[in-house]
Image: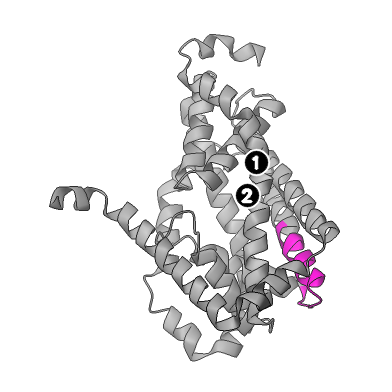
Amino acid sequence: MIGWFSKNKNLILRVFGTALAILLIVLLIEREGWSEITSSLKEISLPVFALALLSLLVSRLFVILRWHALLRSGGVDIPFSRTAQLTLTGLFASNYLPTTIGGDVVRLGGAMRLGYDRAVCLASIAADRVIGLAGMFCAVPFGLIPAWKILGAATIQLSAMPPLVAKITDFIRRTLHSFSIWLKQPAALISSLLYTWGNMVFIFASLYILIEGLGEHVSYSLVAGIWSLAYFVTLIPISINGYGVQELSLTFLFSRVAGLTPAHSLAVAVLIRIIFLLASLPGAAFLPSVLAAISDPNANSRKGSS
């Protein structure tokens, strides 16, 4: 029994963290009143929700373009359609499987079974993650500076948490070697970073649309900063896919820093989660073919026909 707990301690921690976060959300709803929360959710009209969803779908296109640029510049002769299928399937797996690593495994496994170079594909996925982190880090000051001014001591207390920045730095250090291919191709790195910023622009726009739909107003730059702060908080491995932790972080930051009501803040946090889940659903259409390619030992020989 002790051995089982030791082997599965990370999963146990994530399950416990997710359950605790969800419990805190329920307590928050109880405090604010279920009618307040449901009223806030009903304030979002269908056209507003559809526009926010469309914005996030556009952001997914930039995610595809970023990885495709890295693969092609790394010498992988992969069609854009295949990159799109693998990326969308990875996004689906990341949102519906109990770990964000699942999406990377699907992308790598699919690419390998289709006969593409394993080392380059693995390096491109690592580079894709680091560039995504670097892009999001650029927006952190837009949220950190206002949060520091408003929260003061509370922000200082957050710094006493396990050093997230150190973990991110260590992750970047361990994967820097993967950039050896692209350090000689700065144009590819720059284009990938631009695609990352394009992805971010439409994620922030989706949040901005939801907030405006509630009759509130928060500057676009502050929306960007708050999302980036919440994004890095969810990287702490204490919940499954950030469920609960992301919602709590966004609710806290939007209410305390942006001045939204707790009911509106929670409504935005819940709706953006739903929109992310819906935006990842197209990947389900490609999941059978990608899984078939992963399980088919003869898939390598058919690489050129894809």
User: Are discs 1 and 2 less than 8 Å apart at CB?
Assistant: yes
Residue 68 in view of the camera: yes
Q: In the drawing, does residue 163 fall left or right of residue 40?
A: left
Question: Amino acid under label 2?
Answer: Leu
| Mark carried by residue 50 | none
Q: Start and end of the magenta stretch? A: 203-219
**How many other residues sit within 10 Å of disc 1, few (<14), some (14-19) or many (≥20)?**
some
* Residue reaching furthest to the left: 2
Between 162 and 184, the one nearer to me in the picture: 162
Q: Residue visible at 45% across and 70% down?
A: 23
- What secondary structure is found at the residue carrying circle 1? loop
In percent of width and height, residue 71 lies at 61, 32
The question of residue 189 being in magenta is answered with no
In percent of width and height, residue 261 lies at 67, 82
Q: In this figure, which residue is indicated by the disc labeled 2?
A: 277
| Mark carried by residue 281 | 1
Q: Residue visible at 69% across and 57% down?
A: 200
Between 156 and 271, the one nearer to me in the picture: 271
Between 37 and 126, the one nearer to me in the picture: 37
Question: Amino acid under label 1?
Answer: Leu
Kindly report the distance in space between the C-alpha atoms of the residues bearing marks 1 and 2. 7 Å
